[in-house]
Amino acid sequence: MKSLFPPLIAVGWVSKTHGYKGEIKIVLTEGISIKPNKEPVFIEWDKKPVPYFLEKWADQGGQAIAKLKNIDSETAAAELTGKALFFEEKKVKRAKGSFDEKELIGLQITDQNGHPVGEVLAVENYNQLVIQTIVNGKEVLLPLNEDTLLKRTKTSIQLLIPEGLLEFYLGE
């Protein structure tokens, strides 16, 4: 079944309410810039994107203050806190050198010494990007940021894995 919405991309999340008239503070994903005009933003409810039209959008460099139509109280805005924010993919601007996290899925992971670690199974955003992989049958979450991403090729990524992190997950 064809989606009713254009292809969407996660651009951030609602961090908290702002004031008492229904405004929200949005933290944008690093390297992403959006300039909403008349098109809606989408907020995920029950794993489905729900469109919201904007009354106000004030970009604050990596963050934004937004007022959504029909969200008119602090209580209504509070229900959005922690939810992912999506925008039409073709209208998202990326900083030079940034990439869509989905591009990493399936790549092989090596550590800072070139030793194989696993395959990127998923990339999640928990206020920071995290890569999910399986090592020795156990799920492992590895931080992904400009400090830990050492190298990226078409088939692999090399990560600086914090000392003791793999041992923690593996119970060694």
Image (tube, rainbow, N blue to C red):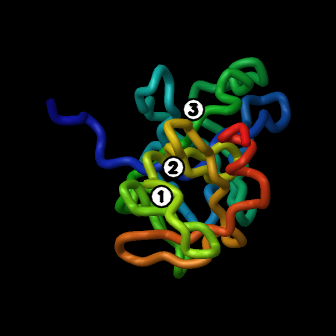
Quarter holding the N terminus is: top left
Packing grade of label 2 (10 A; few <14, some 14-19, many >=20) is many
Q: Amino acid at mark 2?
A: Val
- Kindly identify which residue carries mark 3: 69
The one nearer the camera, 38 or 108, is: 108
Quarter holding the C terminus is: top right
Q: Amino acid at mark 3?
A: Lys
Packing grade of label 3 (10 A; few <14, some 14-19, many >=20) is few
- Kindly identify which residue carries mark 1: 101
The one nearer the camera, 120 or 101, is: 120
Q: Are marks 1 and 2 in contact (CB under 8 Å)?
A: yes
* Label 1 or label 3, whichever comes before in sequence order: 3
Residue 11, percent from left and from top:
54, 52
Q: Where 113 sits versus 85, above or below? A: below
Residue 148, percent from left and from top:
68, 68
Residue 2, percent from left and from top:
16, 35
* Label 1 or label 2, whichever comes before in sequence order: 1
Q: Amino acid at mark 1?
A: Glu
Q: Where 123 sits versus 72, above or below? A: below
Question: Distance from label 1 to label 2 (Cα)?
Answer: 6 Å
Question: Distance from label 3 to label 2 (Cα)?
Answer: 31 Å
Q: Residue at x 75, y 60 (%)?
A: 162
- Kindly identify which residue carries mark 2: 123
Packing grade of label 1 (10 A; few <14, some 14-19, many >=20) is some
